[in-house]
Amino acid sequence: MASSRNSRAASALSIFSIFLHLSAAQLSTRTQWLPDNYPLPHLGNGYLSTPLFGERMQVQDLFTRADRPVRVGLPSTMAVRVDRHQDIAGSSVNYTFNPEAGFFETVVTVQQRYWVRQRFYAHVRIPELFVMELEAEVLGKLSANEEISIPLWRKGCYDNLANECIFTANDMTFTHTVLSTGGLAPWTKKVSVAEGNVTGNPDSSNRTSSNIAIMWDQAPPSITLNRNTISAKGVFLTSISRNITAARKAYDEGHEQFASGVLYSRHRDFWGLRYNEGRIQFQAAPGSTGHKLQNAVFSSLYTVLSAIPSHPYFLEDFLGVGPVVDDDNEADLASAGRVRWEQEIYVLPSLLLLQPAAAELMIKNRVDQWVEALENAPAASSGNFSYRGGKYPYETVTGEELWEVHDRSQDMDFLRAVHVSGDVAFALQEYIKAVPPSEWIDKDAMMRTASRIAEFYLHLVQRLDGEQEGKSGIKQLVVGINRFLTATTAPDPIDPRFYVQFHTFTHAVASVALRLPESISRLGFSGGGVNLDVAELQRLADNIYFPRDLLTSGHLTSSTPEHTEQSCEPDVLLAYFPLRHKAFDTEDQAQFCSMVEADLIDHAPKKGSCDIKSTYVPIRRSVYELAKRRNCPLSGLSQPVPDMLSVVQGDFHIIPEYQWTSPGETLPTDRPFRTSLAGHGAFLQGVLNGYAGIQLDNNRLLIDPIIPEGTEAWSIHALNYQGFIVNLRFSREEILITVTRENQHATLYIEPGSADYTGGNDTSWRVKVGGHITVKRSRIYLVAVAADSFHWSQLPWLFQSTSLPAAKYMPEVGNGHIATMVNSSWVHMNGLYNGEGPKSSRARIPSLVAFTVRTNHTLPAQLVNRTYELNVREGIFTTTTRLRNPSLVITHEIFAHRDNDRLLAAHVSFTRPKDALSHRDSREQDPVEIFFDKFPDESQLRSEDIVFQPTRQISIGGNQPESLFKEADGRTVIPELKGMAPSPINMIWRSTISNFVLAAGQEVSREIHVYISSRPSETRAAAQKFRGKSSEFIKNAHIAKWGSYWDNGRIDVDATENFELAQGLYGSLYFLLASLPNQQDQGNRFIGLSPGGLARGPANSDYSGHIFWDTETWMYPPILNLHPEQARLLLEARTLTLDAAKANAILYGYKGAKFAWESAYTGTETSPWPPSGEYEIHITGDIAFAVRQYLYVIDDKMKAIREMRLEEMAVEMAIFWQSRSACSNGTTVTCSIINVMPPDEYHFPVSNSIYTNYVAKLSLELPAYVFKITNNSHPDLNLWLTTAQRLAMPKSVMDGKEFHLEFDGYTPGVWHPRSNVNVPEIKQGDVILLGYPLDMDMSPELRKNDLDIYRKVTDVEGPAMTWGMFSVGYLELGNLVEADTLFERNYENIVQPFGVWSEVRDGAGALNFLTGMGGFLQAVINGYGGIRIREDHLALHPQRLPKTSRWSLVGYKHLGHQFNMTFDFFHNTMTIHIVSKTSIAPHLVLEVDSGQIYDLPQAGYVLTVRTEKSMLREYQITDEFTNPGPDTSTSTPPPATSGSPVNPSITPGLPTVTGSAPPATTPSSSPALLTNSPLVMLWLIFLTCWFSFNRS
């Protein structure tokens, strides 16, 4: 299989090489005479430019008119033609445009008497030169005196009475000199010079020219051939520069090169080099649609590149490009050569990946203008308009704001075109995505520019709904002026006097600009000269408002009704391409298809008072192709979306500025034809984005190609991405990828987006320089990873590295029954401890899977690479080694089987590629010796903690080879309690591990399966289950079981937005689940979670594997709703040690049940530090709180209470707290709990620890709640409730602020005598836990005071989980800045590359710290999700996670329901999908803060509402539903219904809802709207009627 795959790829590569290097040029030809005003290409080299046969020529830096600069149009010396013979019978013509060589050629043949060839080009190696070559030859013979006169039709500078080339131009004065007659060309009569001065120069910085010198060969009226000169070839040069010396130098150099025959070839070859730097090529038959597409692509690339200099001398003076080619002061056009927003939106994106050097010139030009942008803001302010920050102008030459000189009081100009700064920000964003930081232009200037632009929009942002700046609960944002006006000028040129509100395109680029500083700072760069809160900018960007149609789900151009009367620029569609704004994307297929179809319909070109721009078709077609890729039916499109070729005009494939024609119409003659630079750029974008499906993401490049009609295959040659150069060839079946240049500081990976490549199931694979790989044509990603970084695939569940960390930071594989750290010599089993009392620790079981593999080929040069990968979705750790000479791939996998949890497995495969046999290197034929090292002695297993019997051979299920196993029994050395029997262990294994020789072309696998349990019967049953099964079958069963966990409970974050967060969530949940079993094991009961997990804890390290309060307070809450069955196991671990807890209470002199601070197997106290065992009694309250939360969540409460002894447990814990409390006598009775250790373990023994007292209060109240369910009671119930109410909750006042005291006599920040450390700090979260998780009722002021005061005195080196709880507290108060800052401190405790957590930041303390992971997950679920589990409801208050726009809780369980909840902060919506519900689950509803109640009737139902505080609760008979619901006269649950589609066009602040239930039903025609505001309702009714009227 490998051989055929590689030979096929080699064949494809050969074809690809031929395809890319065909010598035939890409030609556009015409054999008919040109009519007037026919679409013709222009000639340019980035310095000079002229339309072919045009009457003016332009110099890129020659401007005039100080008030509003315009480019000067010089009379053209190139307006000379030989093709005016159409009236002569027997004459023929052939026109050729060769963009790949940069020339236009005319060949005329007259009556078989002579032919004449004329070739034009603007020389790219000598940029000051225009060149016109003439060649003529007589056909046949001439008589002695016969002459042929070939007329030259001349215009431009020749269009005057003198019939000679004379320079005159508006805004300039010239002097002329005739230098000589004759010249190198045989027909040249005069060599002339003109020197000119600009009468008005706008630029004091001298970036534009005020002087010009032209030296040229005058063209005669005709050329003559005779018998002596039957053929001749000559050249007419025009040299233009700032002074006569430079002009003469270029002129002389041109004639010298022509005389030596290299003038044209050097120009041609340089153009060839430019095309080799990046081009697109289609394989199609001549005359086919694909062939026309090919010519249009080459024409577009030429048009764009010819406007950008390539000669080093002219790079510094580059001023940017305007929207139209050859635009000047004679053209009477608005742009007149000035740079506008089209540069960043249309031109730059088309070049960034193909011609990055050209794109960088535009970036540099804008970055260099940041000072002018700062000056533009105050300069443009007037009246109600006020700006600050970096305002880039609508039109400019050197960065200054330019405007029409109208009445400024009426603001009739483009001052309010505030989108241009965002356009520049978008260009910068794309640049940093495409170019590696090591190759960036001035990094400080880029950050400065980004910061100033962000400051500009920060000043423009205003809040809707009357919310004041700084107030929490932002719903939506809108770009406006001065925070009270919302008028901006739109790109769509309806009328410069007409301003629009809430303009979609402006809002889209504004959100890009607000995110840009964070994107740059994420790559390690800071500064900018302005102090900006990056997190605040992100929040503003996430909440930018986009107006939507009331009748469809499409977007409005703006909220100004008149703005829908016509559509001449693709404003809204630009948000799809090139902006790719996330507000215009959603994973919901139906919602996306509805939205994009509406936008394609509503934003089709509509001509009004403006002409439709040619940019429209390519952009709209790109959006159409995107929709088709998403399998959108688009059945509502009444007319097909035009193909991109429909905008291309003429045989030379030129794109005009405007779409003047429709099918069947003729070209207009009343207006000059102008080539659109923006149109050609949009066309190239249409090919790259629409056909190739290319999108730049933050960390990767998406490629999703289609094969356009009329083509067999096509390619992108020399695509530049992150310093790599890649060739891509797309055929109908495959993509061939070839890397031709590598970035020495990074590695390029190709990652499948939907299907794996044609040779295996790898999730990523590397492409080397000069190498190639063939993949199935589908969605793929290119990922460039810095050489020293990890996680190159950028999949959040893959932890990858090319090196291993220190052994203590290695990850584990586990299943809750057994676990081991990768490469560790030891395995641990749940409940297996060795040692008495406090000396107990996890017993070390010898590992049979920690072996290593080596070969007899050990030279460093033979190692290609070695990679390590932890796949947490599959629970597998893989080491992959690639060798060469001879070629060999070794894949070594280890996993603890998730389904058959007694099994620990290691699989190793060895593959020698068959295609390597054809290599000339003889070493490919050599055998390879394979060795397995570090494998223990199987005959006698040894451990300091376990005494093993000698290993014996056994048979399970028969005598076949697969039935033969080895078995060893053992017992721990020292039991946990005196008189207790040592704990047993039984191991059974089957192995094929042994040294062997691997022949060339062989594929061999080896494996070992080790089954571990406490009882031989269980171990043998586990081995029997997989007896005779293949390794692949065993691994797939393991992967499937892990898949069921992830499918039914996880947190999803878009990794392209915040990879660190997405991976942290996957890693944290994996490590928790890896220490949790599938179910309760009667033979080996689950004993709970230790802070270091199941894989750690031997020999008194990592807390010896003991169980603490960490289980209930930190690890249990995130598991409770995502995996409640596993949460039950954690509670059962306590109920099964209830008798031990009763014994502990007696031991310490109390009643009831006192759970041990540290426990191992028996539940007795095992703490090696006596004070904690005696004083840290809050653990009993923590367990009581966990019981309460569990009963709040599950549907069958009675069953759980009965099966788990929860009533008895609640009573015994209340008895303990009653016996531990002391109540005073007197009129005011207060109860105290003295001599305790709070969570702050720095202080003990203290009295009235408020945390301890509050969990005691909740524990004393727990029996009353349980009795409500069971209808039981207890004689002391009232006593417990009375004590609970009387327990002291100490408070104090500091600086006038009331706060909770940690304990009696404590003063924050002051050393206390009961402190056991010599510092005034507290160890960890203590008082702040009252608000969450304990949910104590307190005022926001009191909560804030607690957070502020204790944050200052908490040890910064304390345990990891603390900062997540501070973050939760600040989220409650709406302080997202503080919350985000504290939340992100969690990352300091994650040790890469495998996401192992440390107890203390920077890798210190216990490892792998599940406690910190639990706090991290709670900060997400209960902090940013705002979830609170209460007796009668589930509270929700979702907020945006840092650096994300949406996130989801998948498989969230509550009261027998399983939900998927998605919080989308781009659209400000919350979606609740009922995945399933049990038969006894209650009927739930969603009640939102604004008062609406939404029905949640049945499984499959989907509800989408505006994001706001809300609660899930049980249905009440008095409920009146906003969406269709039950008959309120009965309590019967309602039938499934379908609500209306969400409609983001509704005025912000108004709720809206969608609902759906299978089978899908047609949504209603308008959304269900609820509001208490009559004015808003009237406004909505008016808009609805207005849109209906205008649509009709």
Image (cartoon, rainbow, N blue to C red):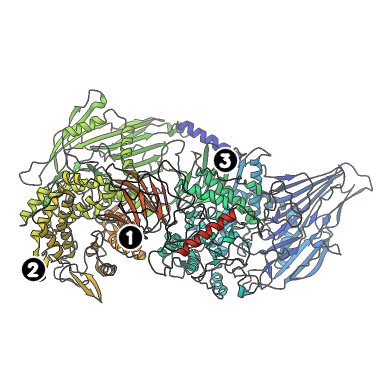
Crowd around label 2: few <14 · some 14–19 · many ≥20 (10 Å):
few
Region of the chain picked out in magenta, as a range: 1076-1096
**Nearer to us in this view, 43 or 663:** 663
Name the quadrant containing residue 258: bottom right
Please, is residue 159 above or below residue 745 in the view?
below
Give the secondary structure at mark 3.
Answer: loop
- The picture places residue 59, in percent across and down from the top left corner, at 69, 63
Q: From mark 3 to mark 2, how far is it between C-alphas? A: 86 Å
**Closer to the observer: label 3 or label 2?**
2
Q: In which image quadrant can residue 314 be found?
A: bottom right
Q: How far from the left and from the top, in percent, is residue 354?
A: 57, 51
Question: Under tag 1, what secondary structure?
Answer: helix
Q: Is residue 715 above or below residue 1165?
A: above
- Read off the residue under disc 3: 707
Q: Is residue 954 left or right of residue 9?
A: left
Q: Which mark is residue 1224?
A: 2
Q: Main secondary structure of the magenta part?
A: loop
Between discs 1 and 3, the one toward the N terminus: 3
Q: Are marks 1 and 3 in contact (CB under 8 Å)?
A: no
